[in-house]
Amino acid sequence: MASPMGAGGSPVTSAEAAAYRSEYEGASGDGWIAFSGIALFIAGLLNLVDGLWALDRSDAAGISEQVEDLLWYSESLEVWGWFYIVTGVLLLAAGVGVFARTPWARWTGILFASASIVVNMMWVFVFPIAALIHVLLGTLVVYGLTVYGRRELA
């Protein structure tokens, strides 16, 4: 069996192979961290849109009676709107923090993504597809940050 050849045509030594491996082993999980930052940012934008929708419909005139019956605390839709706007801003900040590799970003992202999962389950009977998209994004963010969030992030 022939040994692998280096750039100059000479065989690669085990030290060179180890250096090459260690250079790329450190990058393990960087894609998940980037995905988590992007997903936090997208979830934040979606929560902002949901919050603005709730504020726009807070008078309940634009909501059918059937949908209003499904809403949890439909009489305080304005409060839900502000809640989603604040949650959206916090998710956006956590997404930016993950990209900046700030120490607080990992746990903040996990906390807000987990809260987003729970809160969006309350909307699953009214807007099932949108709510499940939020839940899926949150779940993948929690996975990415817990499994691949290295000590440098925490």
Image: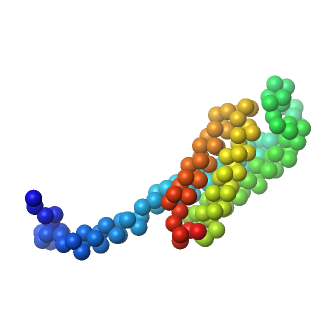
User: Residue 105, located in which quarter of the rendered image?
Assistant: bottom right
Left/right placement of residue 92 relative to residue 8 reads right
In-front residue for pair 93/22: 22
Disc tally is: 0
Q: Percent from the top left, x then y, of residue 91?
A: 67, 56
Q: Is residue 147 above or below residue 120?
A: below
The residue nearer to you, when weighing 113 against 47, is: 113
Q: Quadrant of the C terminus?
A: bottom right
Q: Is residue 49 visible?
A: no
Residue at x 18%, y 72% (from the top left corner): 13
Lateral position of residue 28 relative to residue 151, left or right: left
In the image, residue 61 sits, relative to residue 148, either above or below, namely: above
Residue at 58 percent across and 52 percent down: it is 141
Residue 99 visible? The answer is yes
Picture coordinates of residue 1, whole percent (x, y): 9, 59
Outermost residue, left side: 1
Please tell me in which quadrant of the rendered image residue 41 appears.
bottom right
Q: Is residue 48 left or right of residue 16?
A: right
Q: Position of residue 23 (x, y in %)?
A: 35, 69
Q: Is residue 113 above or below residue 7?
A: above
